[in-house]
Image: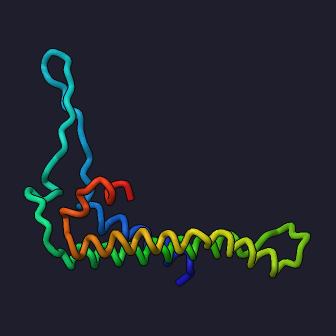
Amino acid sequence: MRPWTLALLCASSAILATHHAWVTPTTVRLRGGSARSVTPTAAEPTSLVKEPAPRLGQGYAVISMCTLLAWTLTAIMALARHPLVKLHPLRHNVLTVAQALTPLPLGCAVLGSLTNSASTEGWWAMNRMTYRRL
């Protein structure tokens, strides 16, 4: 299996695994022309209790690994070759790929925080504004 195929497979499985957790606000037109925003509640729990949710944490861990793997493989595949290089080709390619991989520690920290909070505090933590922004 080629690396770009594996990256595409990881990215698509991550999207499909989290599709049920997405909540999309919809706008409902009322009689008289006014509109109000309605958020469907079928995909989210009815009561957000601060309790451990290990399966939610496992889901975040899998998606985190797929995200970081897809980022790494994309950087390597896209930047490993350069047609017009004036520097030593190996040095140029290594520096280019290394520059593309510099956000990985930040990604590990953010995704690790999401995974930890999801597994220890569950949906309550994921509903907080801090984690919704991440």
Residue 51 appears in which quarter of the rendering? bottom left
Quadrant containing the C terminus is bottom left
Image spot of residue 50 (x, y percent): 14, 67
Image spot of residue 84 (x, y percent): 86, 67
Specify whether residue 47 is in view: yes
Residue 38 shown left or right of residue 110 in the figure: left
Q: State how the image is colored.
A: rainbow
Of residues 133 and 28, the one nearer the viewer is 133
Work out which residue is located at the far top of the displayed protein and give it.
Answer: 32
Image spot of residue 79 (x, y percent): 70, 70
Instruction: Identify the residue at horizontal 80%, vertical 74% (top origin).
Output: 92
Q: Is residue 122 above or below residue 48?
A: below
Residue 74 appears in which quarter of the rendering? bottom right
Residue 13 shown left or right of residue 26 in the figure: right
Work out which residue is located at the far right of the displayed protein and give it.
Answer: 86
In this rendering, the count of numbered labels is 0
Instruction: Identify the residue at horizontal 32%, vertical 66% (top origin).
Output: 16
Image spot of residue 9 (x, y percent): 44, 73
Specify whether residue 9 is in view: no
Residue 84 shown left or right of residue 35 in the figure: right
Work out which residue is located at the far left of the displayed protein and give it.
Answer: 47
